[in-house]
Amino acid sequence: MLKRTLKRILRHCISAVRIQVLIMTVQTLNCVWKQYMSAAILNIIQMVNGFSVSWSASMVLKLIDAKTTPLSRVATETEVVLITNIMFIGIVGAYVSSYLSNHIGRKYCFILGGFIYCFSYLILTLAVSTSMIIAGRLLVGFSLGFIQILIYIYVGEITSPNIRGIIMTSLSIFQCTGCLIGFCLGPYLSYLQFGFVPIILIIIFIALSFFLNESPVYFVIKGDEESAKKALNYFGRSKDVNYELKIMLQNAKENAQGKRKWLELFQRSNRRALLIIIPLYIIEQASGVIAVILNATAIFKLAGSSVEPAVATMIVGVTNLTGSLISPFVVDRYGRKVLLLFSAGGCCLAMTALGTYFYFRQMFPESVGSLGWLPLTALVAALFTYSVGLTIIPHALAGEMFSPKMRGLGTSLGLTVANGSGLITTSIYSYLAVNVGIHYAFWMFAVFDLVGVIFTIYVVPETKGKSLSDINAMLAK
């Protein structure tokens, strides 16, 4: 009898706990669902950003083929290089949006950026000459820089600390999804058809952007405390509204006292943030994965792989997406630092293996006859580990570490360094692969990845579970 009673009480207790957990879950979702909805809107344009990265991998092949080019002649080698790399220069758009976002607001910058993006793809898609294509790619790069910095700033400002990592990582997932869409559709659509895919997504984004709520940080910068409170409540952050608003006002007051904005970037917490973010962006680009993505087809052929070029690019896209899908489930559990260590360490091992394979293939071809599987395996491992950490964490930290008014400028500088590093890295890779030996390029990447591991261990702080105000206070010490 007593045993039955105890079992009954235990069952009731378990049921009560389950109900309480369910209630707490519903309450949590009720508080933060607008944060998730805002992120969902931004993820539409993130797919376009990913599509823009994969555009050249698919369309350059059409531009150099007389049967598929939309032009009166095929593109020359010099034109192909410009079409592929000129997008890096367009990163200046990040500086424009970081300036405008503090004057007209984050929301209206999103809308403006959407129209610029749409115009850029119309030029690129309807081009009748290589000059128009080059101009279109430059404007696409400008639009990507304009929009992407706003996304990371805005998400960092509106999200609660406990879900910021998940939402930040979702941005990477949808960018990888856009990249995969480009890889998959490229071989099967004409140049004109391919160009209208991002245009449709951009139009949807522009329409939904009108429903975005303005960031509370923007209202604080403008001195509108009441609107800032409403914005915090709108995003379900009523529990920390007073504390967050107090810190935001304090930061805004300190930032407003500086007369020269660039000098403020090198003061107190912003200087330390800069010394963390800039090296991470360099390591991200110098990890070798960007160069691998841009030259995946050539690497597969050089390794003796029988994989078709179209299939190889799809493998690249699927691997990137798989890593990004895993990242949200671990970013807030294990933190930014652990993911960076795993990512840089994994890339280091993969690049070392690739370099060693190609060295023996060049010097002692018969010794690697049974290792034809190694390059593909190492390449997939590098792409996977990269997409889990290095591809998202630097952007997430940039959105968290800079003070409100410096966030736009600091992130712009970081993205500029990233694009410059990417351009330099891919250029060095091309030179080494052609003139010295591809194995030296991979070993160089492995060294940078090892530096990334050491830098993460000794320099990068953990921001997991901390509010933006807490992070700023930590860096100001």
Image (cartoon, rainbow, N blue to C red):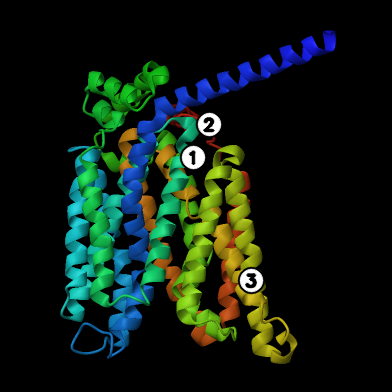
Q: Where is 476 relative to 181, above or below?
A: above
> How much space separates mark 3 and mark 1, taking CA atoms?
29 Å
Task: Report the residue that reaches farthest toward the front.
Answer: 1
Q: Nearer the viewer, residue 238 or 366?
A: 238
- Crowdedness of circle 2 by 10 Å Cα count: few (<14), some, many (20+)? some
Image-quadrant location for residue 90:
bottom left
- Crowdedness of circle 1 by 10 Å Cα count: few (<14), some, many (20+)? many
**In the image, 115: left or right of 165?**
left
The label on residue 465 is 2
Q: Position of residue 420 (x, y in %)?
A: 38, 63
Residue of label 1: 165
Q: Where is 208 relative to 76, above or below?
A: above
Q: Nearer the viewer, mark 2 or mark 3?
A: 3
Figure label count: 3
User: First in sequence: mark 2 or mark 1?
Assistant: 1
User: First in sequence: mark 2 or mark 3?
Assistant: 3
